[in-house]
Image (tube, coloured by chain):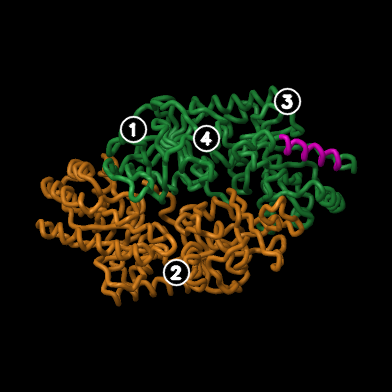
Chain colours: A green, B orange
Amino acid sequence: MIEAHADFPAQHLPDLPLSTPAVVVDRRILDANIARVADSAARRGLMLRPHAKTHKIPEIARRQIDAGAVGLTVATIGEAEVFAGAGIEDLFIAYPLWVDMRKAVRLKLLAEKTRLRIGTDSVEAVEQIARELGDAPLSVSLELDSGHHRSGVLPDDALPIAQRARELGVRLDGLFTFPGHSYAPGEQSSAATQESAILAGTARELREAGHEIVHVSGGSSPTAEVEEPTAAQEIRPGVYVFGDAQQLELGRIGIQDVSLSVAATVVSRHDHEEAEDDGPSLRRIVLDAGSKVLGSDRPAWATGYGRLPNHPRARITALSEHHATVVFPPEDALPAMGEQLRVIPNHVCLTLNLIGSVTVIDGGAVLGSWKVAARGLNS
Amino acid sequence: MIEAHADFPAQHLPDLPLSTPAVVVDRRILDANIARVADSAARRGLMLRPHAKTHKIPEIARRQIDAGAVGLTVATIGEAEVFAGAGIEDLFIAYPLWVDMRKAVRLKLLAEKTRLRIGTDSVEAVEQIARELGDAPLSVSLELDSGHHRSGVLPDDALPIAQRARELGVRLDGLFTFPGHSYAPGEQSSAATQESAILAGTARELREAGHEIVHVSGGSSPTAEVEEPTAAQEIRPGVYVFGDAQQLELGRIGIQDVSLSVAATVVSRHDHEEAEDDGPSLRRIVLDAGSKVLGSDRPAWATGYGRLPNHPRARITALSEHHATVVFPPEDALPAMGEQLRVIPNHVCLTLNLIGSVTVIDGGAVLGSWKVAARGLNS
């Protein structure tokens, strides 16, 4: 019944009685992750522009910049406003914005405070940018579809957009892509190759047509660490600061790289209940961390809705808003009522968006807390 | 490829240019939903105690009380604190709380402000309540498992917990259950029958053993409107105030009952892309509402990650944090770039937890906004 997609040794985390659920970040592991990816980017001659939608925390952004990041990537104007306010001087909103009047006002103010780049993927959006933003001092990067089939244009459709931008005086001087399909099992290397080929080919085509392309940007967390030559000059990984159960189960990080977990309490315990009619085991505990703190993302290949670092064979089989149902194999004892356990969320970006602050620890010591300043800023 | 689980006529919602994504509540439909369920409960002689985790908004709580609700249900102490602060005088935390020292302090303060009931499902939790809460003026209800297999005990395990409460002087005077399996297709009526049988049988057993049971509480949104006799004296539906795509696709409400939608803008549009290798259609738009506003719940039977009321044949095939990928059938024209559409989330309780406020409308007129005062209060 229970199949392990990722095995790891049980962790012996310090006992930290907290008011649960509480999100805990180990600063030492966080800093090691920040340094590892910064060093890898530097060694490969790549500019690192971490995606701040993962953490939404100015203190973490500052540590990324101090470790050598050239600036930050964000997903929304609201996130850009928070990080510009916190003193970050170079921001890329890697999203095909539709710049209406209200968004234009905010972007103009932002462009006065910080170096600013935004995304686009259509002639219509470029025309809207020309109309609403005029000669505001910002640049535009064109999003390419490198196989994820979300936003972004196919390489053949890139040139007409760049031409239209030139006609209208819009400074389109970059390309970017998000190889989101690299998150699927076995797709990491081929997605990285595809990404590189599409960026290289389109940059060449646009340059041959006389367009100055100074930003060539790629790289999700899974492809950022593929140690192969790439046409990207910049990478934008996000998840690497914390790690999560998805990255762990894909085998792309180890349990020692996970810096964030959710402390949760055993609130219900059912040690002697049997399965019904060949159904799944009903021998379970319930933790007070549900989808409203873990997020409910669950790829088909995942073992469940997150992982318990101290109980690698346990499986989170169901998640309600405030309940995680955790089934244990017959050979493992169930934790006691009231015990506090740690849970690693499947997709850590969702967790940060659900909470007001994180508790910062170093091994067994609580150092304080950081505010999730850009939480919930969807527009 | 596209299979409709619930058909409905396209709606022609008024155009409301908003800064998207924005969550919009139609007050007239909201009030009709509040009145419909209040009338149905009154006609059946049931006390109505709506679950406020769905909306988290004091203005909506007040409308529910004014329509005849006896009090509110909440999921966490934090939610109870907000609604007690807003003047609601009768609250049930329908959750098996593990009452540690910090939670005990908060519960004692709450019990001074409002009539308070909390949940439990084990001898250990009852002992903890006795230890930490002493003679605080609150009552305890025992959670029963009526087939959902989350928290809650099987009927055979109820009596020992009630006995232990009596020994320790804990006022255990109620039973409750959550028939969460009633959300599955075809399970509504049988889940309601199971719920009623388990509540009736356990109440009888405990009363015969001399326990005074004054609260018998059941009813998710799907079972609350089953018009059959029930042993429950109180129901706790939550979702009915807004409706959502799950309820719509289960056929339990009509499109005219949905009071909440997310306004989103077309930010990317791909009209001429063909499917690859027998894959799904790639003819799509992308909206700026992703899992960080819609939530990522998606039951296996759902058609996608939400529904578009104006485009009943469109399917939300993928959701990223800030992107909804929407595929249209060949016969439907794609909406234009920059157009604002409405999206009905799959599970509306998650959406309210992701935003700071809702825009309140009446048909085409914007009336103002309500703050989501209990957002993100997980403990």
Q: Quadrant of residue A366?
A: top left
Left-right relation of A153 to B141: right
What's the amino acid at mark 1? Asp
**Disc 2 to disc 4, C-alpha distance:** 38 Å
**Disc 4 to disc 1, C-alpha distance:** 21 Å
Picture coordinates of residue A33, whole percent (x, y):
56, 27
Q: Nearer the viewer, residue B112 or B20?
A: B20
Membership of A94 in magenta stretch: no
Is B376 drawn above or below residue B236 in the view shown? above
- What range of the chain is rendered magenta? A193-206
Q: Which mark is residue A332?
A: 1
User: What residue does disc 4 label?
Assistant: A249
Dot 4 or dot 3: first in sequence order is 3
Q: Is residue A23 visible?
A: no
Q: Quadrant of residue B46?
A: bottom left
Q: Nearer the viewer, residue A348 or A247?
A: A247
What's the amino acid at mark 4? Glu
Mark 3–mark 1 contact, CB under 8 Å? Answer: no
Q: Residue at x 33, y 42 (%)?
A: A284
